[in-house]
Amino acid sequence: MIAIIGSGITGATLASLMKNTTVYDKARFPGGRLASKPFSDGYYCDLGATFFKDKVQILSKSTVKDFSFINWLEEHGINHCKYNETNDRQIYFSPNGQKTISEFLLNKSALKFNHELISFSKLSKDSFNLRFLNGEEAVVDKILITAPIPQALSFFPECEEKEAWETFLKPYSEYRKTLVCACFWKMPSDVNMLEKIQAMDTYTWLDKDSDSEYISIESRKIKNSTSLVFMIQFSEEFSNLHFDNWRNPDRSPTDFCKSVMEEQFLNFCENNQIKIDTFQQVDQWRVHKWRYAQAKYPLLGKNGVLNFDSETFKEYQNITNQTKINILGDWLYGPRIERIVAGVLQNYEKKN
Ligand SMILES: Cc1cc2nc3c(=O)[nH]c(=O)nc-3n(C[C@H](O)[C@H](O)[C@H](O)COP(=O)(O)OP(=O)(O)OC[C@H]3O[C@@H](n4cnc5c(N)ncnc54)[C@H](O)[C@@H]3O)c2cc1C
């Protein structure tokens, strides 16, 4: 029996390739950072990854090959849509939320949610005992950990394997924080404003030098939408500064968060020559604080070719073989879902 810790895109892709697995996740549902949250009437927003790209290049055994994530989704019968942007950027999303990609890949697996791994121990060369916060234990032959590195290292018992992994992972273990907020207006009273937003050529805005680093009109993922979902993922600097003043214990936005969102929405309208009279009261909020949003220095880089011939990747393979423990995720392949899928397929598809 193989234990996969985490049901995000890494764990879900692994589970789709392997037999005799059980996927454990501390959350109540799958997806991890593919986090689609519902509003009323079928509207939703993706609070983690909002879109993906198609092509990834892979270098292995001195040969470069192209991986098409879109073809792979199609082969697996997983729906996707393309943003009709007029510029050259080809970006895609999953209708009904990015989380459905993980759900689909996990549909044949044994799943255990509300299972937070707190530690494991090695019983023999090929056998591990897992202990969960809910008191359950499990004995497995193999363990594949897909939680972010700081969480992954917290499971290890004090042993030489821990030391080896800690030393190896040090250069890759930094993550950026991201604060996120989405506002949902079920029936925007300002019809003119809604029409203008619906008619814009652009659906998403990336401005790395501003507090509101990434803006997405998430309601445009729904055809002919009559409601509005306005979402912002904030910059690292802004998020570090306001991390503890963003969400109340009941998951509602703090007054500070609300005031920032109002200001940002008014700026957005002004910058896009959309005249509005007043800021309409928001019907529903979604607020999130990502402590481990994205790996900052992934082993195989954030962009470009996934180089499986590199010396550091060989070192990674050595340590997984020696310790019989595997840790993988965006710190390895880069914080992009198409890179993660391409990387997991490259490393695991043929072996299983
Ligand atoms: C705000 C934001 C925006 C992003 N935008 C994009 C984008 O537009 N496009 C893109 O391609 N990528 C984007 N990314 C990056 C992408 O979402 C991630 O790289 C990817 O989803 C990581 O997947 P993963 O499976 O490796 O990790 P995760 O999705 O984090 O999965 C790990 C899982 O492990 C579980 N877990 C953790 N600890 C334990 C434990 N102790 N026991 C059991 N389970 C545990 C977690 O609950 C989680 O489900 C974004 C990320 C964020 C946060």
Image (cartoon, rainbow, N blue to C red):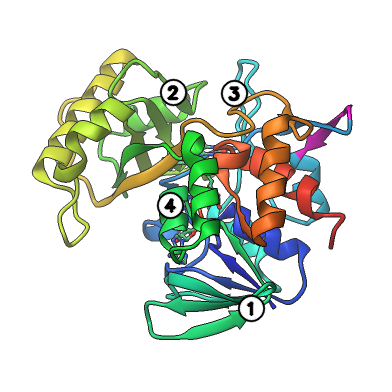
Quick one: quadrant of the N terminus?
A: bottom right
SS of the residue under disc 3: loop
- Residues in magenta, as a range: 62-68
Q: Which mark is residue 293?
A: none
Mark sitting earlier along the chain (2/4): 4
Left or right relative to 27: residue 5 = right
Frontmost of labels 2 and 3 is: 2
Q: Label 3 sits on what residue type?
A: Glu
**Is residue 227 something that shows in the picture?**
no
Magenta segment includes 66: yes
SS for dot 2: strand
Q: Residues within 10 Å of mark 4 (few under 14, many from 20)?
A: many
Q: Name the side, left or right, on which 269 lies relative to 35.
A: left
Amino acid type shown at disc 2: Trp
Mark 2 vs 3, N-terminal side: 3
Task: Give the Cα distance between marks 2 and 1.
Answer: 45 Å
